Amino acid sequence: MGKVWSGSEDRLKMNRLSSRNNSQFSTRRQFGAMSSFMLGGLSVAAFDPMQQVMGATADSAAVGTPHVTPRVKRVIFLFMHGGPSHVDTFDYKPRLAKDDGKKLPFDLPPNIDAVPKLLNGPWKFKQRGQSGLWVSDLLPHMAKHADSLCVIRSMHTNGQSHGQAVGMVNTGSDNLVRPSVGAWVSYALGSAHPDLPAHVAIGPATAHGGPRNYGAAFLPAMHQATSVGSNGKPGTGQISHLVGPGTEREIKERFDLVRQMNLEHLRAIGSDRELRGAVEAVDLASRMRLAAPEVFDVERETDETHRGYGIGTKETDAFGRSCLLARRLAESGVRFITVSSGQVWDQHGNLESGHNKNALATDQPIAALISDLKQRGLWDDTLIVWGGEFGRTPVVQGKNGRDHNPQGFSMVLSGGGVRTGITFGETDDYGYFAEKDRVHMHDLHATMLHLLGIDHEQLTYRYAGRDFRLTDVHGRVVHPVIAS
Amino acid sequence: MLKPSSLIQVFVFAFAWTALDCHAQDPSHVDFFESKIRPILIEHCYECHSGDSAEIAGSLRLDFRDGLLRGGDSGPAMVPGDAKLSRLMSAIRYESSEMPPDGKLSEEVVSDFDRWISAGAVDPRGPMTHDPQEESGVDWEQAKNFWAFQPRSVVLPSELSPDQLGDGVSASLIKMPSDGLVDDYLNHEMALAGLTPNPLADPEVQLRRLSLDLTGLPPTIQLQDRWLADPSHQNWVRIVNELLASKGFGEHWARHWMDVARYADSNGSDFNATFHEAWRYREYLIRAFMLDQPFDEMIRQQIAGDLLPHQDDAKRLDNVVATTFLMLGPKMLSERDKAKLELDVIDEQIDTVGRAFMGLTLGCARCHDHKFDPIPTEDYYALAGIFSSTQTLNGESQKYVSTWNRVPLPVTEQQRLALETHQRELKRMQGGVKEVEQKLKGLKASLDGSMDGIVLDDVEAKKIGHWRDSTFVKHFVGKGYVHDDASGKGEASIQYSTVLPQSGHYEVRVSYSPGTDRAKSVPITLTTANGELQLVLDQRSISVEPMWSSLGIFDLSAEADTRLTIRNEGTTGHVIADAVQFIFQQDQRLHGEDPRESSAASGKQNAEGMAIKQSVEQTEKRLSKLKGELEDHKKNTPPALPVAMAPSDRAAEQIGDSHIHIRGEVRNLGDVISRGFVRVCNSQQTELQESAASGRQELASWLTDPNHPLVARVFVNRVWMHLLGEGIVRTVDNFGYQGERPTHPELLDYLASDFVNNEWRLKSLVRKIVISQAYRRSSQDHSASISLDPENRLLWKAPRRRLTAESIRDSIIFSTGQLDAASRIEPMAGRGVLVSSNNSDSAARFDDVALPVRSIYLPIVRGYLPDLLLALDMADPDLLVGKRPTTNVPGQALILINSQDIRDWAAVTRDRLLEQAMSFESRLEAVSRLLLQRFPKPHEIAIARKFFDGREADDEAWLQYISAIYASAPFRFID
């Protein structure tokens, strides 16, 4: 079964027609098998004669047999770029409040600029909902959904600087160029909509790797995210080049003319698979041009919905639009949606004002997204992941800031596939190091794939002589956070 | 500590167990192993660590005693008698590798293992008699039988035996007409398969194909005319030679190699540093391919150019610039663990050299022996020693952020002198400006209200113990301040003393630069006529900006010395001592009144103030004059001395062999491996002879040995792919076991040997291929041939190929008639250390895509690739790309049809075509010849007629028509 999910950069081999040296040839059919779900997306790969040119249909995405029973159909990753402080949001540390201003009783990790003096944040923690989950006053809206959240408090990751850690959370690699999580998901599952991409990045950052964080690397290019906007803002909210110069009539006229030229060219040449791929792609583009603008148009929602997401209010407008767009895409069959906050959570100084500002911008839209998904029955088969590339130190940096903390931090899951109203794992008394039930970023990735029905050890792609995985040679599924 | 009652319980239990089963409780007895250890090993460990495991994790086996002793990738798992030193213990305690992974063993079990090992790890299980997994040594004889590691052998087509003919194929078919050996080899295979090759393509199709393949640009109308007038073989060869001699050839083939060299003008990754000097490498490639420099020399230059001898400056420049090849990979420059960063950089270099030149995936051997190819980890670290002896990174551009090595390029003596003189003068002038600025600052400070009253600076005070001078933190009186270095506590004191001009109330202030690392309770003693007052000062903050803290108002006498002493006794953190100030308080003084006007000393001070003000004005004038001179001088800066982004050998004491890094981990060291090369390619010796240098020069010689089994084959195969769609080995970057086998091994060896014999010259190789019939064939499908060879492996037809991203853009601009032949030399000139601010809110743009230059001259800024080229599958500069993926995603159609740039270009082309008065039919013909380099086909004329239908004179309709052709299949494909 695992082979169904394995692909390769190489083409299917065929025996050399001459029988000499026959023993040197082998036939590898994985690619042929894979192509059936590669086509789940939008693309028609040219130059692969073994791959039939076919229009994608709604059910062509449901290909490949899942390794495990899928619990969710899609992932929305709310990427809090910069690294929000876990000890000021979800990881309640009474000792930190008690020992505020005292010296950290153990050594700092190497290469950080903080001084070993504990700093308690200004936000009060309270137990929320029926579950009694601890959430601070920084996130009052998310706190209302406490019973729908699963807080992993023992996250740890690689990379003391943003670049490495951002690569780690988005691609599973802190140093080398690797496909992004969404690209792997797109590669495995394809899109559930014939005219939409499987992988979309809303407001992705241009720094810290930029497109690499939602790229395909060595996976087929179609698995790269279609990006909308940049740096925490949804921009036009639309896929680029859906519209172009001229009136709608002119654009349509161009599409029709190109289509005609291609078809007649193909007819004159006779059969040609490569050409047919190109011809088909124009048709797909034409359909996408008609389908996507509607799906991507958040203006079609009611005023009430807009207000819920904070659209129209200065502070929440951008992230509210991004979250609402994420919901529309989730509803339409997109498999992996990253919504980026922009690199705003990096409070080396002015923790209070900075975090307040960021929470104000994101908290209400996120809570609205959860409510909205629930109301539409989508929450049950969606996995929401909230978090940054790392957390922040419980000790002070400068006068009133916190440095990066990949040694221990929290990430929050929500959705029908996970156990909610619980915390999993623990950091030490001050929230510095993940101690109990440690969850590495690779483990989180393994768990995300598992919830989608994918065994992270079996989803492989052959490139440069070896089979690559999202989790490299690491990763363990964190079963205790999965709903029974 | 245990309470007495629990102690008793422990004894009771121990006694009970001993009584029940005495041997099972004795960790030195075999029963202990059988009852407590073996079951745990079987249940929790054997799945991954025994002979039955699908894959032995970490190469560690726990199903026989020696397996534990010998250990795995991380070393021995156990030291009998010493549980502390045993990795097994730290693993099951979850202190190191956290085993078993599905959950920690109970404390009791962990303690059993501890006791068992401490007691000598008695284990009745015998040693393994045979362990095939352990035979990691490569069987070299066997390995070398693989085709790619075999020496090349040239078997001429006439010698190929006509045995094993397909059914019904007569031997006479082998004698097909051909123009040379390339066709002879191909025809032979086709005859054996019973295939009939396609006839030659239409002449205009042939010419378009040739021109785009050789130069990346379509043929001009003049060339089309010349060719159509005489489509003879002689004329073909003449045109081939012309195109080979054009600059376009150098540009187009340089771009091919840039794909392999993962060329970029910025680092990308975490810290998108500008590669200001990468363009020199691009220019070197264009120059080298244009001049048909032998490729073996180009390999030597790219690996070790900085070490090569040179006869003149031009050669030296090429040599050094070529090594930029090793530097271009994306690097995690902000990685704070520099040892890890170095290792990752080396890995990227080894992987690139391996795949670029040898088609070997050496990167696989970083963590373990290559799973498929005969490349043991030792071979990887033999190469790693060469690259770790090479300086690739050098220094930091800011804290924690590494930057790379730079090598000065040759300059004339005159240039050097001019720059040196200029810089000396610059330094002198900057010194002058700084001096005057300091003076001015001093003058202004003395005008400042904060300098009222009587001020005693630290230089006038009596110091005891160690006080260090500093000017590090701003705001201080005079030329600086002193501090106690946060050391020698209780030993240092500083005493300020003065006789005040009159008795009365004084506010006493001290100045210092505050900070979090300052002492918070500094003892101060104020000695007055009335006795001693003990005060405490918190130096973490100040009360009066910019640098003062008030100690309070005191009644001080003019009759006796007033002394203020600052000590560092009992303090932690830095104690700062700068100045002390005494400000007289007039009883009637109102709150907020300016003390300068009411102070008793103000008359004197006002007079002084006037003098100072005058002095300030004069000094300001002088300063502005000096600054003007400095600016003028800067404007006349001669060009900076050129440098290349290139490696150097490290200093002699840093050159040496590398350890194996077990599982590729930075601090997990194994044996030291002598520097050397890849043993399976043993065209000559594979170990480096005693060398005081890195060994790159030896590596370069080893690679370019004419008998190296891979290097020439790999390069020739790349060239074949660019001309015929697929390589003879279709996995162009992988010639190992996991790669494909050659479709025509004899042809590959013939071409490679011929290439080497022709001094590794690209142009002769290209010429040989493009004058073959195989190259010039029609790409038309043929059902009989398809059924025999659907993938066209035997090349019965020419492959239909998509133009490269660059060729599509360049062809469009070419048709506007505005393509600028000049190259943009330095695309990144004027950019800072970072291509854009690392703050992700900055939206940097690189809009050069609209410029009418060839695409090779556009900057390749990682993370900011132009949408148009990206959509058309340009090479990802983060990766080595031997064969570009060709996709047909709808995004391509969208951008080709809707891009504003393309629309603008279409408008220029339209204007150019509509300038001349022509009939509709002639105009259609002109469009077709300009854009598609052929006369329009009847069906194309029909489409056009229907489309224009009364709009023949409408500019907008022509714009639409031309735009559509740019997006159409006939334009985007090479037939």
Image (spheres, rainbow, N blue to C red):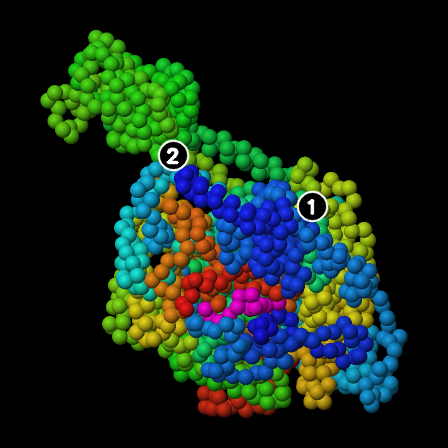
Amino acid, disc 2:
Ser
Looking at the image, which is closer to me, B646 or B603? B646
Q: Which residue is mark 2?
A: B624
Which-is-in-front pick, marks 1 and 2?
1
* Picture layout, residue B639 above or below residue B365: above
Amino acid, disc 1:
Asp
Answer with left or right where residue A56 lies relative to residue B738: left
Residue B674, given in percent of the width and then of the height, sits at 73, 46
Residue B577, given in percent of the width and then of the height, sits at 35, 23
Do we see residue A433 in this rendering? yes
Q: Which mark is residue B671?
A: 1
Which secondary structure type mostly characterizes the magenta part of the structure? loop
* Picture layout, residue B165 above or below residue A391: below
Looking at the image, which is closer to me, B630 or A235? A235
Queried whether the magenta region covers residue B264, the answer comes back as no
Do we see residue B744 in this rendering? no
Disc 1 is placed on an element classified as strand
Residue lying at 80% horizontally and 62% vertically, measured from the top left: B142
Please give the range of residues in magenta: A451-462
User: Circle 1 marks a residue in which chain?
Assistant: B
Disc 2 is placed on an element classified as helix
Determine crowd level at label 1: few under 14, some 14-19, many 20+ residues with C-alpha closer than 10 A.
few
Residue lying at 53% horizontally and 77% vertically, measured from the top left: A65
Separation of disc 1 and disc 2 at Cα?
65 Å
The image quarter containing residue A336 is bottom left
Residue lying at 77% horizontally and 53% vertically, measured from the top left: B702
Looking at the image, which is closer to me, A472 or B458? A472
Residue B875, given in percent of the width and then of the height, sits at 58, 65
* Image quarter in which the N terminus of chain B is found: top left
Residue lying at 63% horizontally and 58% vertically, measured from the top left: B49
